[in-house]
Amino acid sequence: MADVRLTDIRKRFGSLEIIKGVDLSITTGEFVVFVGPSGCGKSTLLRMIAGLEDISSGELTIGGTVMNDVDPSKRGIAMVFQSYALYPHMTVRENMGFALKFAGMAKEEIERRVNDAARILELGPLMERKPKALSGGQRQRVAIGRAIVRNPDVFLFDEPLSNLDAELRVHMRVEIAKLHKALKSTIIYVTHDQVEAMTLADKIVVLRAGIVEQVGAPLDLYDDPNNTFVAGFIGSPRMNFLNARVISSEAGYITVALASQPDVKLSLSAQSSAAKPGDEVSLGVRPEHFRPAGQGDADLVLDVDVAEHLGNTSYVYANVSPDERIIVEHEGFRSADSRDRLTVGVSAGSSFLFDSAGVRIR
Ligand SMILES: Nc1ncnc2c1ncn2[C@@H]1O[C@H](COP(=O)(O)OP(=O)(O)OP(=O)(O)O)[C@@H](O)[C@H]1O
Ligand SMILES: [Mg+2]
């Protein structure tokens, strides 16, 4: 069993607390992705699980055993970094087998494991090459192979694809998904990439400044974010937040008027007790949820600043008022252009309400 459990995990560098009490439960075979802005503590948390950083307080268990003070080599984990750091003078085969040889494993067993990993990663024809004769994606596959041969209970990945170009990233993303299916191992994966997080994860952990903001399945976070931070972080382009004021709050509905376009009112289903008339709130609308005029519950009139047409869809950057700018994404706005006036529909059913502290009003 390789379930990983973090209980009130904290990390202090001197007097500075970087990880501020993380509780997390990861079950065997689960693919968990850590996301969050730069500096929020993703790598630090991963390195604490790996044993490359001390745990200041709290408890880490892997497979039920407390690991706080266990040597990294004895935790049953293998880590893959962004910089693959292969040994340049060794062949692919030697790179992959090195750690096992160093640990004194029998030659036949090393051979067997390296060949297995090579087959899974389709490295067969490259085994006798040196790293300098490999592409970036091939090198990254070797780095993953080096982790696989150790047969770990838990794989830790820290932005493994961020050195690769866009096309290779997509290719390797699919490879990693296949790898997880084949090995059924527990994976903890750090990324900045929205699409990697959404497509690979069974469970996404959204971190902000050393605190877990929300944990959930990718689509649950997209459909049901707890606050403006998670709502803005999951989904790309990010959710728009429009200033609004509560007009009335009754019988499961809250009606708001937009600050910028006060004649625009929208009634959203919500527990009415959470908001009072006059409250300042924000209305969250994802760019992809705007509709052509007349097809929502209310229409907004926008002044187009810039329109980007990608063929399959268009991104329209537009002002709702002189100081409120939003992004609208729709395949039907192909002819929108700078300085146009554009009317778009907003649907209550796909909009969100947040209070003035950014907490979701449900
Ligand atoms: N050894 C250290 N001493 C002091 N502060 C540190 C140390 N290592 C990391 N930090 C700080 O801890 C915070 C979290 O760093 P960490 O590398 O975990 O962030 P991250 O979420 O992985 O960011 P990125 O997305 O940029 O990789 C940062 O503010 C960083 O400056
Ligand atoms: Mg990092």
Image (cartoon, rainbow, N blue to C red):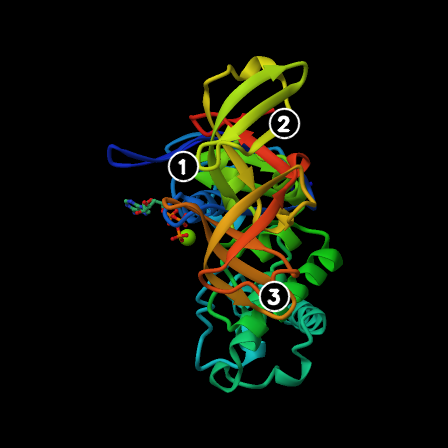
Looking at mark 1, is its residue's CB closer than 8 Å to ligand 1? yes
Looking at the image, tell me whether mark 2 or mark 1 is earlier in sequence order.
1
The residue drawn where x is 62% and y is 62% is 148
Ligand 1 is within 8 Å of the C-beta of the residue at disc 3: no
CB within 8 Å, label 3 to label 1: no
Q: Secondary structure at mark 2?
A: strand
213 on left or right of 29? left
User: Where residue 320 sits: x, y (%)?
Assistant: 46, 45
Please name the residue that numbered disc 3 is placed on. Answer: 334
Query: Helix, strand, or loop for circle 1?
Result: loop
Residue carrying label 2? 267
Viewer-proximal residue among 247 and 281: 247
Q: Residue at x 44, y 66 (%)?
A: 83
- 210 in relation to 191, above or below: above
Residue at position x 66%, y 85% from top? 125
Q: Quadrant of residue 137?
A: bottom right
Q: Nearer the viewer, mark 3 or mark 1?
A: 3
Q: CA distance from mark 2 to mark 1?
A: 36 Å
